[in-house]
């Protein structure tokens, strides 16, 4: 179903025709929604939007608020790389007064004093604190935490012979690792993982869950001020950028939330592919594709976030023949960009070794946590497959359910079965006393069993 074009956008449609890129005959005569049933098949929707509008399409967000979705690969790069005229400052939005109460995108779009919503020098200052702190993390240490928490999570269900890999694994692992990297106690991981999940699903208790996270972070910031350690909270607090306590708090929260859903989706989507696609599994186990190649392939075709809201024009401009007015909101579309026929005429061609996808965006705001996201997914999946090599999908493929949130696919559940085993012996408060069962290596990825602590 299409929604009539709002009066104030009509003149801009004429401009598009005027600059020589006429709308095709398929012009729906109205705008398409980027949410609800229309958005259930992103590939078909992108193709329709491309055929009708070109590299940039006017679409509707929840509340039927009109925004521009950037579809083309090059157009996404151009917008993501240019803080002028495409700012990150959501306070510029010319439709802010039409946003309904409890709008589902509020938590993503409401302005906060973090690197996400600033440009230029202000952005460079806070961003430097984030990137320098992330760089100080010990990569080897991250992989040890991932391996340890994977074993802890598997221990909760290993004796039952069944699990839901979304709720019991993919959604929990990134939060466990991040709470530890931030400098929190290991015991905080489960509570914060539950709170983050609740917050992101926008449930009735989301506000209470937000408070759980905030209270834990305030406690952390105070504790690290009194006694700094080797962790993100301490490094952010002492960085030469001189972040205020509120800024430290805001960036710790940002890192938790930014890492959580993205990495959980990457893990869940990759496990789904391994469990359901025989060719994918055979390429992994036969050594034709490494696990990191597999993850990169997922970042092209099943990326964790397909739409990034956004950018806001800070001047009148034109983009692919459209007149963009100051204050208009644009959505980056890495999902559409990664499948742009201009750069990938044949989507079945393998993309091994090619990291030029836009899953982590581009330009000054490009994700600073990409290596950590990759490390959590890679080590987590490898360890899980080594522990439970006989894992199989417990339902038929068409019973697997997805939720669609603004064209980002999220698996609801991934039920698996395997041979029940006795729990692994893990020492609390330190790394595991006994590692993997006598395994020779991962049958899916060919990697040697991880016997490091
Ligand atoms: C597979 C996992 C991940 C994916 C796909 C991903 C993707 C993205 C994307 C698309 C953006 C928006 C960039 C833009 O506005 O142009 C972003 C921003 C960001 N991400 Fe990630 N991310 C992932 C993991 C992480 C992790 C693990 C962390 C932290 C350790 C993190 C921290 C951030 C931060 C702080 C920003 C804001 C950067 C800025 O505005 O300057 N991300 N991420």
Image (spheres, grey):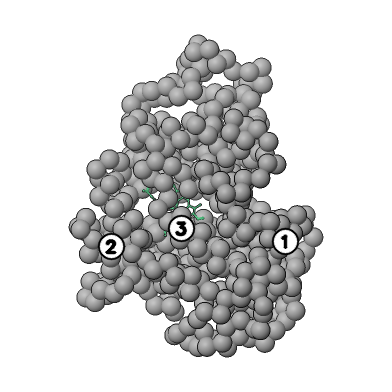
Q: Which circle marks residue 321 in the picture?
A: none
| Residue 426 place in picture, x, y as percent | 54, 86
Q: Earlier in the sequence, mark 1 or mark 3?
A: 1
Please say if 15 is above or below 296: above
Q: CA distance from mark 1 to mark 2?
A: 44 Å
Please say if 384 is above or below 97: below
Of helix, strand and loop, which one carries label 2? helix
- Between residue 416 and residue 36, name the one nearer to us: 416
Q: Nearer the viewer, mark 1 or mark 3?
A: 1
Q: CA distance from mark 1 to mark 3?
A: 26 Å
Q: Is residue 42 visible?
A: yes
Q: Earlier in the sequence, mark 2 or mark 3?
A: 2
- Between residue 220 and residue 287, name the one nearer to us: 287
| Residue 134 place in picture, x, y as percent | 36, 61
Q: Which residue corresponds to mark 2?
A: 236
Q: Nearer the viewer, mark 1 or mark 2?
A: 1
Q: Earlier in the sequence, mark 1 or mark 2?
A: 2
Q: Residue at x 62, y 45 (%)?
A: 351
Q: Which residue corresponds to mark 3?
A: 371
Give neighbour class at mark 2: few <14, some 14-19, many 20+ (Cα, 10 Å).
many
218 left or right of 3? left
85 left or right of 200? left
Q: Tell me the quarter of the image containing the N terminus.
A: top right
Numbered label tally = 3
Q: Residue at x 54, y 27 (%)?
A: 55
Q: CA distance from mark 2 to mark 3?
A: 19 Å
Q: Which residue corresponds to mark 1?
A: 286
């Amino acid at each position: 179903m299409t929604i009539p074009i709002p009066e104030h956008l009509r003149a801009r449609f004429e401009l598009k025709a005027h600059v020589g890129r006429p709308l095709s005959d398929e012009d729906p005569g109205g705008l398409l929604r980027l949410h609800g049933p229309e958005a259930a098949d992103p590939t078909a929707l992108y193709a329709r939007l491309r055929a009708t509008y070109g590299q940039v399409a006017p679409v509707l967000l929840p509340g039927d608020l009109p925004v521009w979705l950037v579809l083309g690969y090059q157009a996404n790069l151009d917008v993501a790389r240019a803080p002028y005229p495409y700012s990150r400052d959501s306070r510029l939005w010319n439709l802010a007064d039409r946003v309904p109460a409890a709008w589902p995108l509020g938590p993503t779009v409401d302005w906060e004093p973090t690197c996400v919503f600033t440009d230029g020098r202000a952005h460079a200052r806070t961003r430097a604190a984030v990137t320098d702190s992330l760089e100080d993390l010990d990569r080897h240490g991250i992989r040890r935490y991932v391996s340890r928490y994977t074993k802890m999570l598997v221990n909760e269900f290993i004796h039952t012979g069944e699990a839901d890999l979304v709720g019991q694994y993919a959604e929990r692992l990134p939060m466990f690792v991040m709470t530890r990297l931030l400098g929190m106690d290991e015991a905080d991981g489960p509570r914060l993982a539950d709170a983050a999940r609740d917050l992101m699903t926008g449930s009735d208790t989301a506000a209470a869950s937000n408070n759980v996270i905030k209270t834990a972070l305030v406690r952390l910031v105070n504790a690290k001020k009194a006694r700094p350690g080797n962790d993100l909270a301490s490094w952010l607090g002492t960085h030469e950028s001189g972040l205020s306590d509120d800024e430290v708090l805001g960036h710790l929260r940002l890192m938790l939330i930014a890492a959580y859903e993205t990495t959980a989706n990457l893990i869940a989507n990759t496990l789904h592919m391994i469990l359901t696609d025989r060719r994918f599994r055979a390429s992994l186990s036969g050594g034709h594709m490494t696990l990191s190649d597999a993850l990169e392939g997922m970042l092209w075709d099943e990326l964790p976030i397909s739409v990034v809201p956004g950018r806001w024009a800070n001047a009148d401009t034109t983009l692919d023949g459209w007149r963009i007015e100051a204050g208009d909101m644009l959505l980056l579309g890495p999902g559409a960009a990664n499948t742009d026929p201009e750069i990938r005429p044949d989507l079945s061609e393998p993309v091994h070794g090619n990291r030029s996808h836009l899953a982590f965006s581009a330009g000054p705001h490009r994700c600073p946590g990409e290596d950590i996201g990759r490390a959590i997914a890679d080590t987590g999946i490898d360890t899980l497959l080594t522990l439970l090599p006989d894992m199989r999908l417990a339902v038929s493929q068409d019973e697997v359910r997805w939720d669609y949130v603004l064209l980002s696919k999220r698996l609801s559940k991934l039920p698996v079965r395997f041979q029940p085993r006795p729990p692994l012996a893990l020492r609390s408060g330190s790394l595991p006393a006994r590692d993997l069962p006598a395994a020779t290596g991962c049958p899916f990825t060919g990697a040697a069993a991880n016997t490091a602590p």
